[in-house]
Image (cartoon, rainbow, N blue to C red):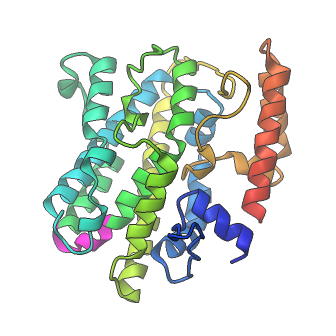
Amino acid sequence: MSAARTEDAAANGGGGVCPDGGVTVLRPTDLSEMLAAGTKEVHEKAENTEFVKDFLKGRIRKELFKLGHVALYFTYSAIEEEMERNKEHPDLAALYFPHELHRRDSLARDLQYFYGEDWQDQISLSPATQRYVERIHQIGRDQPALLVAHAYTRYMGDLSGGQVLRKVAQRAMKLPPTGEGLNFYQFDGIHSAKAFKQLYRSRMNELELDSLTKQKIVDEAVLAFQFNMEIFGELEEVGKTLQDDVLDAAPVHGAHGEMQGDISQCPYYAAKMAASGGSSYICHLAMTVLKHPSGQVLLAAWIAALAGLAAWYLM
């Protein structure tokens, strides 16, 4: 691993910081590195599903967004139930952060906003979500160490890209600026996402796991991505039956044009597709952005962000 790649890994939570301010060099046998390498292919497949690409462009159907939140509610309920049940397990105790990470209650508030007081009577498990939930409960009973894969894949991804996705959804669906319907993306117990991710990955790498268990966790993470893709596929099929109620939003930026959050670390980030040669994607995005009064400024900032992402990814 190059020095530049090591520094970047630390900046994104992948490496530890030594007491003297130096960077802990990651090893190929560290679980975080094994997960990154082992899930690369399925990661790219997930980020190129139509549902995810539309979301990242700001083309969001409110009904699909609601159904996506329903799937997340059941998924996180299962993860958090099993993490709670196994919180003293030696392979999980160091990764038990209920105050900082748990999403079930936040999702419940969002669903109440979208569906009303009787929201629990209006939602149900979809077939793909049920398969996902059943798998989580199965390993929670039989192989608790594999819960690391599901917790890492979901929490770190949502924490990394959540702030950008929150802004995209808020603008596209014209949701209140006070955050109703978007509690899922708000991690009130974490003051620095960068520092927390660094802590989480460091603790994960310090788990006393043999090589076979580490590989099983990597395989389980691949399975987690596949479960998520099945849910995306379901949502795409539902979308075909809906009226075209898409709400279009330009890429979300801060007051001075800079991108807020760390969308490049989201497991389902599609922009590097453009950075690595997706010229048609760039052209489509440019035409969309230029329709807005501040389109030229936004386009310039977006291209700068893509260039930075390309440099990081190809380093």
Q: Which residues are magenta?
A: 141-147
Placement of the N terminus among the 4 image quadrants = bottom right
Between residue 44 and residue 185, name the one nearer to us: 185
Query: Which residue is found at the position 72% from the left and 51% from the top?
Result: 272
Q: Is residue 43 magenta?
A: no
Q: Please state if 100 lies on the left or on the right of 230 as rendered.
A: left
Query: Which residue is found at the position 59% from the left and 18% from the top?
Result: 247
209 relative to 260, above or below: below
Between residue 61 and residue 39, name the one nearer to us: 39
Residue 259 position by quadrant: top right
Q: Please state if 315 lies on the left or on the right of 279 as rendered.
A: left
Q: x and y percent of residue 208 in the render?
A: 33, 82
Q: x and y percent of residue 311 in the render?
A: 79, 57
Q: How many marks?
A: 0
Between residue 242 and residue 88, name the one nearer to us: 88
Placement of the C terminus among the 4 image quadrants = bottom right
User: Can residue 290 be seen by looking at this rendering?
Assistant: yes
Q: Is residue 142 magenta?
A: yes
User: Can residue 226 be seen by looking at this rendering?
Assistant: no
Residue 15 position by quadrant: bottom right
